[in-house]
Image (tube, rainbow, N blue to C red):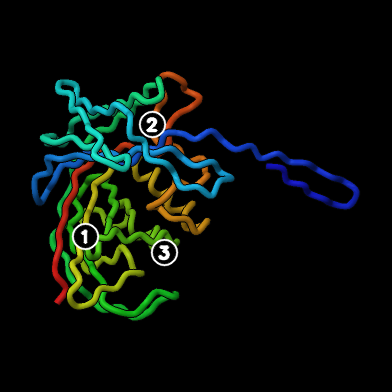
Amino acid sequence: MGLLLTACETEIDLTLPDNEPRLVVEGNVYYGLNKPINKQQIRLSLSANYTSNELSNPITNAAVSVSDGTAKFVYAHVGNGVYEAANFPAKPGTTYQLTILYANQTFQATEKLISGPALDSIGVKFFPSSFGSPVGDFLVLHMTDPVDEKNFYLWKLFINDSLKINPSPGNALRAIQKDNFFNGQRLINYLPYDNFPVVKGDYAEMQQLNISESMFNYCNALFGLTSAEGLSLAGDLPPGNIKGNIKNISNPKRDGLGYFGACSISILSKQIK
Protein backbone atom coordinates (compact mmCIF):
# COMPACT_ATOMS: atom_id res chain seq x y z
CA MET A 1 0.00 0.00 0.00
CA GLY A 2 1.45 3.39 -0.97
CA LEU A 3 0.78 6.64 0.86
CA LEU A 4 1.72 9.97 -0.71
CA LEU A 5 2.29 12.96 1.56
CA THR A 6 2.68 16.45 0.11
CA ALA A 7 4.11 19.37 2.09
CA CYS A 8 5.19 22.56 0.30
CA GLU A 9 7.65 21.45 -2.39
CA THR A 10 8.58 18.10 -0.79
CA GLU A 11 6.98 14.79 -1.68
CA ILE A 12 7.49 11.75 0.56
CA ASP A 13 6.39 8.33 -0.62
CA LEU A 14 5.76 6.01 2.33
CA THR A 15 5.20 2.31 1.72
CA LEU A 16 3.18 0.47 4.35
CA PRO A 17 3.77 -3.24 3.72
CA ASP A 18 1.23 -5.79 4.80
CA ASN A 19 2.62 -7.84 7.66
CA GLU A 20 2.59 -11.60 7.41
CA PRO A 21 -0.17 -13.04 9.62
CA ARG A 22 0.98 -14.36 12.99
CA LEU A 23 -0.30 -16.98 15.39
CA VAL A 24 -2.70 -15.50 17.96
CA VAL A 25 -3.25 -17.36 21.26
CA GLU A 26 -6.15 -16.72 23.64
CA GLY A 27 -6.64 -18.89 26.70
CA ASN A 28 -5.93 -19.67 30.33
CA VAL A 29 -5.48 -22.62 32.60
CA TYR A 30 -8.07 -22.11 35.34
CA TYR A 31 -8.33 -23.29 38.93
CA GLY A 32 -11.91 -22.93 40.12
CA LEU A 33 -12.40 -21.33 43.54
CA ASN A 34 -16.20 -21.72 43.75
CA LYS A 35 -16.58 -24.86 41.67
CA PRO A 36 -14.13 -27.36 40.18
CA ILE A 37 -12.94 -26.77 36.62
CA ASN A 38 -11.75 -29.87 34.80
CA LYS A 39 -12.01 -28.67 31.20
CA GLN A 40 -9.50 -26.16 29.81
CA GLN A 41 -9.71 -24.30 26.49
CA ILE A 42 -7.37 -22.37 24.19
CA ARG A 43 -8.29 -20.54 20.99
CA LEU A 44 -5.87 -20.21 18.08
CA SER A 45 -6.17 -17.95 15.06
CA LEU A 46 -4.12 -16.07 12.48
CA SER A 47 -3.92 -12.31 12.77
CA ALA A 48 -5.18 -10.23 9.87
CA ASN A 49 -2.83 -7.92 8.00
CA TYR A 50 -2.73 -4.42 9.45
CA THR A 51 -4.13 -2.95 6.21
CA SER A 52 -6.73 -5.66 5.75
CA ASN A 53 -10.43 -5.50 6.58
CA GLU A 54 -10.62 -9.29 6.92
CA LEU A 55 -11.29 -10.99 10.23
CA SER A 56 -8.71 -13.35 11.69
CA ASN A 57 -8.90 -16.97 10.58
CA PRO A 58 -9.22 -19.83 13.10
CA ILE A 59 -6.39 -22.37 13.13
CA THR A 60 -7.75 -25.91 13.06
CA ASN A 61 -4.68 -28.08 12.41
CA ALA A 62 -2.26 -27.33 15.25
CA ALA A 63 -0.96 -29.72 17.90
CA VAL A 64 -1.58 -28.21 21.33
CA SER A 65 -0.50 -29.45 24.75
CA VAL A 66 0.20 -28.14 28.25
CA SER A 67 2.69 -29.66 30.68
CA ASP A 68 2.96 -29.18 34.43
CA GLY A 69 6.45 -30.69 34.56
CA THR A 70 5.10 -34.14 35.36
CA ALA A 71 1.94 -34.71 33.31
CA LYS A 72 1.16 -33.65 29.75
CA PHE A 73 -2.38 -32.63 28.79
CA VAL A 74 -3.21 -32.88 25.08
CA TYR A 75 -5.80 -30.49 23.62
CA ALA A 76 -8.14 -31.59 20.82
CA HIS A 77 -9.67 -29.23 18.28
CA VAL A 78 -13.42 -28.95 18.91
CA GLY A 79 -14.28 -26.34 16.27
CA ASN A 80 -13.63 -22.77 15.14
CA GLY A 81 -10.05 -22.73 16.35
CA VAL A 82 -10.94 -23.79 19.91
CA TYR A 83 -8.83 -26.56 21.45
CA GLU A 84 -9.99 -28.36 24.57
CA ALA A 85 -8.43 -30.60 27.20
CA ALA A 86 -10.81 -32.63 29.34
CA ASN A 87 -9.88 -34.10 32.74
CA PHE A 88 -7.38 -31.31 33.40
CA PRO A 89 -7.76 -30.09 37.01
CA ALA A 90 -5.26 -27.29 37.58
CA LYS A 91 -3.44 -26.59 40.85
CA PRO A 92 -2.35 -23.26 42.40
CA GLY A 93 1.38 -22.70 42.54
CA THR A 94 2.03 -24.96 39.55
CA THR A 95 3.95 -23.69 36.54
CA TYR A 96 2.35 -24.64 33.22
CA GLN A 97 4.05 -24.67 29.83
CA LEU A 98 2.02 -24.39 26.66
CA THR A 99 3.45 -25.95 23.49
CA ILE A 100 1.95 -25.39 20.04
CA LEU A 101 3.19 -27.09 16.89
CA TYR A 102 1.94 -25.24 13.83
CA ALA A 103 3.24 -24.69 10.28
CA ASN A 104 6.49 -26.52 11.08
CA GLN A 105 7.19 -24.15 13.95
CA THR A 106 7.14 -24.57 17.72
CA PHE A 107 5.58 -21.96 20.00
CA GLN A 108 5.80 -22.01 23.78
CA ALA A 109 4.58 -19.96 26.74
CA THR A 110 5.03 -20.45 30.48
CA GLU A 111 2.94 -19.14 33.36
CA LYS A 112 2.66 -19.95 37.08
CA LEU A 113 -0.90 -20.40 38.30
CA ILE A 114 -1.77 -17.60 40.70
CA SER A 115 -3.96 -18.30 43.70
CA GLY A 116 -6.10 -15.59 45.23
CA PRO A 117 -9.42 -14.71 46.86
CA ALA A 118 -12.89 -15.68 45.73
CA LEU A 119 -15.79 -13.31 45.28
CA ASP A 120 -17.72 -12.85 48.52
CA SER A 121 -20.98 -12.14 46.71
CA ILE A 122 -22.57 -10.22 43.85
CA GLY A 123 -25.58 -7.93 43.81
CA VAL A 124 -27.55 -5.39 41.82
CA LYS A 125 -27.30 -1.66 42.48
CA PHE A 126 -28.88 1.35 40.79
CA PHE A 127 -26.50 3.95 39.33
CA PRO A 128 -27.40 7.26 37.67
CA SER A 129 -25.83 8.22 34.37
CA SER A 130 -22.23 9.41 34.60
CA PHE A 131 -19.99 10.70 31.79
CA GLY A 132 -22.27 9.25 29.14
CA SER A 133 -22.89 5.85 30.73
CA PRO A 134 -26.50 4.61 30.80
CA VAL A 135 -28.71 4.90 33.86
CA GLY A 136 -30.05 1.71 35.42
CA ASP A 137 -29.36 -1.35 37.57
CA PHE A 138 -25.87 -2.84 37.33
CA LEU A 139 -24.17 -5.98 38.59
CA VAL A 140 -21.76 -5.19 41.41
CA LEU A 141 -19.37 -7.38 43.38
CA HIS A 142 -18.17 -7.69 46.94
CA MET A 143 -14.74 -9.18 47.69
CA THR A 144 -12.02 -9.05 50.34
CA ASP A 145 -8.44 -8.46 49.25
CA PRO A 146 -5.83 -10.43 51.22
CA VAL A 147 -3.60 -8.34 53.46
CA ASP A 148 0.15 -8.03 52.76
CA GLU A 149 -0.13 -9.64 49.32
CA LYS A 150 0.40 -8.17 45.89
CA ASN A 151 -2.77 -9.05 43.98
CA PHE A 152 -3.90 -8.37 40.43
CA TYR A 153 -7.48 -8.78 39.18
CA LEU A 154 -9.39 -9.03 35.92
CA TRP A 155 -13.20 -9.04 36.02
CA LYS A 156 -15.44 -10.38 33.26
CA LEU A 157 -19.18 -9.77 32.98
CA PHE A 158 -21.62 -12.06 31.18
CA ILE A 159 -25.28 -11.21 30.62
CA ASN A 160 -27.44 -13.98 29.20
CA ASP A 161 -24.26 -15.95 28.39
CA SER A 162 -22.87 -13.07 26.32
CA LEU A 163 -19.48 -11.61 27.29
CA LYS A 164 -19.82 -7.86 27.79
CA ILE A 165 -16.68 -5.87 27.14
CA ASN A 166 -16.51 -2.14 26.52
CA PRO A 167 -12.87 -1.03 26.44
CA SER A 168 -13.59 2.59 27.32
CA PRO A 169 -10.97 4.48 29.34
CA GLY A 170 -13.25 4.43 32.39
CA ASN A 171 -13.86 0.70 32.25
CA ALA A 172 -10.15 0.10 31.66
CA LEU A 173 -9.48 1.52 35.10
CA ARG A 174 -12.11 -0.69 36.76
CA ALA A 175 -12.18 -4.01 34.90
CA ILE A 176 -8.49 -4.61 35.67
CA GLN A 177 -7.00 -3.63 39.00
CA LYS A 178 -3.97 -4.02 41.21
CA ASP A 179 -4.54 -3.70 44.93
CA ASN A 180 -2.20 -0.77 45.62
CA PHE A 181 -5.03 1.35 47.02
CA PHE A 182 -7.14 -1.32 48.72
CA ASN A 183 -4.66 -3.89 50.02
CA GLY A 184 -6.28 -5.93 52.79
CA GLN A 185 -9.61 -4.13 52.42
CA ARG A 186 -13.09 -5.18 51.33
CA LEU A 187 -14.55 -3.89 48.10
CA ILE A 188 -18.27 -3.20 48.50
CA ASN A 189 -20.61 -2.58 45.58
CA TYR A 190 -17.65 -2.51 43.21
CA LEU A 191 -18.72 -1.79 39.60
CA PRO A 192 -16.29 -3.14 36.96
CA TYR A 193 -18.49 -2.16 33.98
CA ASP A 194 -20.89 0.78 33.84
CA ASN A 195 -22.03 0.30 30.23
CA PHE A 196 -24.22 -2.76 30.67
CA PRO A 197 -27.32 -2.43 32.88
CA VAL A 198 -29.38 -5.50 33.73
CA VAL A 199 -33.16 -5.84 33.64
CA LYS A 200 -35.64 -8.26 35.16
CA GLY A 201 -35.24 -11.76 33.76
CA ASP A 202 -31.58 -11.40 32.80
CA TYR A 203 -29.13 -14.11 33.81
CA ALA A 204 -25.93 -12.37 34.91
CA GLU A 205 -22.54 -13.81 35.78
CA MET A 206 -19.44 -12.18 37.24
CA GLN A 207 -16.00 -13.76 36.94
CA GLN A 208 -13.00 -12.70 39.01
CA LEU A 209 -9.62 -13.79 37.65
CA ASN A 210 -6.61 -13.61 39.96
CA ILE A 211 -3.88 -12.93 37.42
CA SER A 212 -0.11 -12.55 37.39
CA GLU A 213 1.58 -9.17 37.22
CA SER A 214 2.77 -9.86 33.68
CA MET A 215 -0.76 -10.74 32.57
CA PHE A 216 -2.02 -7.57 34.28
CA ASN A 217 0.51 -5.50 32.32
CA TYR A 218 -0.56 -7.18 29.09
CA CYS A 219 -4.29 -6.62 29.75
CA ASN A 220 -3.64 -3.06 30.84
CA ALA A 221 -1.80 -2.29 27.60
CA LEU A 222 -4.51 -3.99 25.56
CA PHE A 223 -7.30 -2.07 27.29
CA GLY A 224 -5.36 1.15 26.83
CA LEU A 225 -4.88 0.63 23.10
CA THR A 226 -8.39 -0.57 22.37
CA SER A 227 -9.99 2.26 24.33
CA ALA A 228 -7.85 4.76 22.40
CA GLU A 229 -8.50 3.19 18.99
CA GLY A 230 -12.12 2.16 19.52
CA LEU A 231 -11.38 -1.49 18.76
CA SER A 232 -12.96 -4.62 20.20
CA LEU A 233 -11.24 -6.85 22.74
CA ALA A 234 -13.40 -9.72 21.58
CA GLY A 235 -12.20 -9.62 17.96
CA ASP A 236 -8.87 -9.23 16.22
CA LEU A 237 -5.89 -8.05 18.19
CA PRO A 238 -5.16 -4.40 17.38
CA PRO A 239 -2.12 -3.45 15.29
CA GLY A 240 -0.05 -2.38 18.26
CA ASN A 241 3.21 -3.76 19.57
CA ILE A 242 1.77 -5.28 22.75
CA LYS A 243 4.20 -7.77 24.21
CA GLY A 244 2.61 -11.10 25.11
CA ASN A 245 4.31 -14.28 26.25
CA ILE A 246 4.02 -16.49 23.13
CA LYS A 247 7.58 -17.37 22.06
CA ASN A 248 8.45 -18.83 18.67
CA ILE A 249 11.18 -21.34 19.49
CA SER A 250 11.80 -22.09 15.81
CA ASN A 251 12.04 -18.43 14.74
CA PRO A 252 12.46 -15.91 17.59
CA LYS A 253 11.82 -13.02 15.18
CA ARG A 254 8.28 -14.32 14.59
CA ASP A 255 6.83 -14.64 18.09
CA GLY A 256 3.10 -15.23 18.41
CA LEU A 257 0.56 -12.67 19.59
CA GLY A 258 -1.71 -12.90 22.61
CA TYR A 259 -1.20 -14.30 26.07
CA PHE A 260 -1.31 -17.72 27.74
CA GLY A 261 -2.36 -17.30 31.35
CA ALA A 262 -2.78 -19.47 34.42
CA CYS A 263 -4.96 -18.19 37.23
CA SER A 264 -7.58 -18.98 39.81
CA ILE A 265 -11.11 -17.93 38.97
CA SER A 266 -14.19 -17.19 41.05
CA ILE A 267 -17.58 -17.33 39.33
CA LEU A 268 -20.91 -16.20 40.76
CA SER A 269 -24.20 -15.80 38.90
CA LYS A 270 -27.78 -14.75 39.59
CA GLN A 271 -31.14 -14.30 37.95
CA ILE A 272 -32.24 -10.68 37.99
CA LYS A 273 -35.61 -10.32 39.73
For label 2, the residue is 246
Judged from the image, the secondary structure of the residue bearing numbered disc 2 is loop
Residue 213 in sight from this viewpoint: no
Measuring 15% from the left and 52% from the top, which residue is drawn there?
118
Quarter that holds the C terminus: bottom left
Q: Where does the image place residue 184, in percent across and percent down from the top left? A: 21, 54
Question: Position of 42 compared to 39: left or right?
Answer: right
The amino acid at mark 2 is Ile
Q: Where does the image place residue 21, in percent across and percent down from the top left? A: 49, 35
Picture quadrant of residue 120:
bottom left
Q: Earlier in the sequence, mark 2 or mark 1?
A: 1
**In this view, the mark in front (1 or 3):** 1
For label 3, the residue is 170
**In this view, the mark in front (2 or 3):** 2
The amino acid at mark 3 is Gly
Per the model, the C-alpha gap separating discs 2 and 1 is 28 Å
Measuring 48% from the left and 27% from the top, which residue is drawn there?
254
* Residue 14 versus residue 266 in the image, above or below: above
Measuring 14% from the left and 36% from the top, which residue is drawn there?
86
* Residue 257 versus residue 185 in the image, above or below: above
The amino acid at mark 1 is Met
Q: Where does the image place residue 219, in percent across and percent down from the top left? A: 38, 47
